[in-house]
Image (cartoon, rainbow, N blue to C red):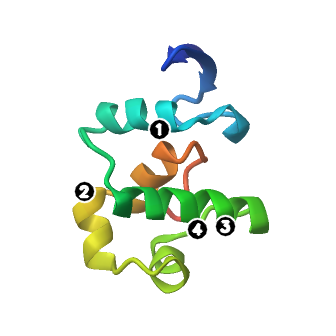
Amino acid sequence: MATETIAGVSVERNEEGFLVNPDDWTEEIAKEIAKELDINELTDLHWKVINFMRESFAEKGQIPTIRGIKNSGGVPTKDLYSLFPNGPAKKAAMIAGLGKPQGCI
């Protein structure tokens, strides 16, 4: 695990780049991680997914899958792939300051 400074905050990240402690997350950190993933602007729909993931994790203790985001978060799968190309659940979880979702490679 490595300690990095993102958006002026010192955080620990694992070898894949996920925050070790979800409580370290801020919206500014989310924006910087998104840029690292070539998502240069977080739209309202991005934030809908990110906030849903964080709320779902806080409530259930599990990171939602694509199916969970689609069914409970109200964002169609096609839109998820458009918002977070090449691995929407993994990228959205990383930007949301959570760990890697179960079932992601």
* Residue at 57% from the left image edge and 42% from the top image edge: 97
User: Tags 1 and 2 in contact by the CB under 8 Å rule?
Assistant: no
Q: Earlier in the sequence, mark 3 or mark 4?
A: 3
**Relative vertical location of residue 92 with respect to residue 38 in this rendering, above or below:** below
Q: Position of residue 101 (x, y in %)?
A: 56, 58
Q: Is residue 87 left or right of residue 98?
A: left
Q: CA distance from mark 1 to mark 2?
A: 16 Å
Residue 25 in sight here: yes
SS of the residue at dot 4? loop
Task: Examine the image and state in which quarter residue 70 appears.
Answer: bottom left
Q: CA distance from mark 3 to mark 4?
A: 7 Å
SS of the residue at dot 1? helix
Q: Earlier in the sequence, mark 3 or mark 2?
A: 3
Q: Which residue is mark 1?
A: 30
SS of the residue at dot 3? helix
**Relative vertical location of residue 99 with respect to residue 2 in this rendering, above or below:** below
User: Tags 3 and 4 in contact by the CB under 8 Å rule?
Assistant: yes
